[in-house]
């Protein structure tokens, strides 16, 4: 099951390090290629000789090998791995990871790693409970690191409580679960738009809409989980993407979104344009705040059309590119969505019908139908937006393979 998977194991200074040889054995028996890096203090708890014997590879603790005179590049190691597992992760190492400190070899590998990082903390219960440690764990999770929570039990100090590193068997199961996630879009360049756009009226006012951006953000996260290189062009949204392998480009207006998409589209394999782009913007933007005229009870703003981003990429699309759009409809959903699919020259369209309950801008759920270029319609149940994202990815995968 783990055959061919490249797992980099990082060991830090904690008594739980004595359990890591067992994890190395489990991974090796399952066919993984394992390499080990250790912090200097980890060597006080488990010997490099044990780990190099079990892993079949030299154990690295610093970049310069005095015997061979060779430099081991931390960049190479970070690029080599499919997954970097830090177990045990001490409070000290987690704090340094959270702040980007790189004062030992393991930490320099952390900063240059392009693969996901999994960490399994181990420490005494008071250190674990400390606000600083909890904040650092939160920071790492928000950055996309995979957290293997410690269990409760007897600790090396003789105290009993939370802070015991999860057992090697459990860590091994988490590693297997990680690799079971489909990698259907490995190395594909994916471009996503999400959120509303704001079209300025004057320095303090704008025309906008209620889109939260959540649907597109979930699509971006799902693509990143399945191995894609994701760029998310995101209109004003209050949601944090929290994924270190999604490149977020914040924009405000339809014009800014259009410019960003046009610049990126030529190098894109799959574009999913889910943003709720304003169709019109004020023709003139006032330099100063517009004051009320006491003599007038009405006020007129002349609007002009914005660029239709989806139609523009549909027009530029080559045979090797796939473009997916959204259709937000309140009536005649299927008919209108099919019309958009063909007039905008795209491959798939995801229909949201706003008149159904649980569907819309501010909900955490959605109910969609996906229509292909040859008018095949698949209708899905109401579900959380992260699950809808998976349905959309599966439909794109089927269409493109
Ligand atoms: N879209 C876009 N640029 C625009 C308007 C819409 O890229 N200026 C994209 C949306 O991101 C979505 C699709 O076009 O993928 C359809 O958006 P929707 O608002 O449903 O339709 P419109 O094309 O704007 O048409 P209408 O407002 O008449 O329904």
Image (cartoon, grey):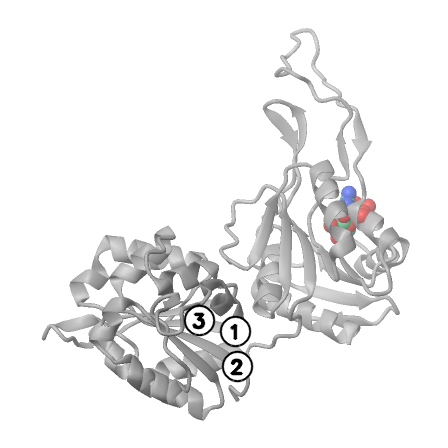
Q: What separation in Å lies between label 1 and label 2 (alpha carbons)?
A: 6 Å
Q: Secondary structure at mark 1?
A: loop
Left or right placement of residue 194 versus residue 66 in this view: right
Q: Looking at the image, which is closer to me, 79 or 311? A: 79
Total count of labels? 3
Q: Which residue is mark 2?
A: 5
Q: Residue 59: x percent and y percent?
A: 36, 77
Q: Secondary structure at mark 3?
A: strand
Query: Callout 1 environment at 10 Å: few (<14), some (14 to 19), or many (20+)?
Result: some
- Ligand 1 is within 8 Å of the C-beta of the residue at disc 3: no
Left or right placement of residue 3 versus residue 328 in this view: left
Q: Residue furthest top?
A: 295
**As drawn, 318 above or below 86:** above
Q: Which residue is mark 3?
A: 84
Q: Residue 140: x percent and y percent?
A: 39, 58
Dot label at residue 82: 1
**As drawn, 400 above or below 107:** below
Label 2 or label 3, whichever comes before in sequence order: 2
Query: Is the residue under label 2 in contact with that under label 1 (CB below 8 Å)?
Result: yes
Q: In percent of the image, x 27 and y 75: which residue is there?
A: 165
Q: In percent of the image, x 66 and y 70: which residue is there?
A: 185
Left or right placement of residue 255 versus residue 181 in this view: right
Q: Residue 23: x percent and y percent?
A: 35, 84
Q: Secondary structure at mark 2?
A: loop
Residue 356 visible, this angle: yes
Q: In percent of the image, x 47 and y 60: which residue is there?
A: 112
Left or right placement of residue 134 versus residue 367 in this view: left
Q: Looking at the image, which is closer to me, 279 or 56? A: 56
Q: Looking at the image, which is closer to me, 266 or 213? A: 266
């Amino acid at each position: 099951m783990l055959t061919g998977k490249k797992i980099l194991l990082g060991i830090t200074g904690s008594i739980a390090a004595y359990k890591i040889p067992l994890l190395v054995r489990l991974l090796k028996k399952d066919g993984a290629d394992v390499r080990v890096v250790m912090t200097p203090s980890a060597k006080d708890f488990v010997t490099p000789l044990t780990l190099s014997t079990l892993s079949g590879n030299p154990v690295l603790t610093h970049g310069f090998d005095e015997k061979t005179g060779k430099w081991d590049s931390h960049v190479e190691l970070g690029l080599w791995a499919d997954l970097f597992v830090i177990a045990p992760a001490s409070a000290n190492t987690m704090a340094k990871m959270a702040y980007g400190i790189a004062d030992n070899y393991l930490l320099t590998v952390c900063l240059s790693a392009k693969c996901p990082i999994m960490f399994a903390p181990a420490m005494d219960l008071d250190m674990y409970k400390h606000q600083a440690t909890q904040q650092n764990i939160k920071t790492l999770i928000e950055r996309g690191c995979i957290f293997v929570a410690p269990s409760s039990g007897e600790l090396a100090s003789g105290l009993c409580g939370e802070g015991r590193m999860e057992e090697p068997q459990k860590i091994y199961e988490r590693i297997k679960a990680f690799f079971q996630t489909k990698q259907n879009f490995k190395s594909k360049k994916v471009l996503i738009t999400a959120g509303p756009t704001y079209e300025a009226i004057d320095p303090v006012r704008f025309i906008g809409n209620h889109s939260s951006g959540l649907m597109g953000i979930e699509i971006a996260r799902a693509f990143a989980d399945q191995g894609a290189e994701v760029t998310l062009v995101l209109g004003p949204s209050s949601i944090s993407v929290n994924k270190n392998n999604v490149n977020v480009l914040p924009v405000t207006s339809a014009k800014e979104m259009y410019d960003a998409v046009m610049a990126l589209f030529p190098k894109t394999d799959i574009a999913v344009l889910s943003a709720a782009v304003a169709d019109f913007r004020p023709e003139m933007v006032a330099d100063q705040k517009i004051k009320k005229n006491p003599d007038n009870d009405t006020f007129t703003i002349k609007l002009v059309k914005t660029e239709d981003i989806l139609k523009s990429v549909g027009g530029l699309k080559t045979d090797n590119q796939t473009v997916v759009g959204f259709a937000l409809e309140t009536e005649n959903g299927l008919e209108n969505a099919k019309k958009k699919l063909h007039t905008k020259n795209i491959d798939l369209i995801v229909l949201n019908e706003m008149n159904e309950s649980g569907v819309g801008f501010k909900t955490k759920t959605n109910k969609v139908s996906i229509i292909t270029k040859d008018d095949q319609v698949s209708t899905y149940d109401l579900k959380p937006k992260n699950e809808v994202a998976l349905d959309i990815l599966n439909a794109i995968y089927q269409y493109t393979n």
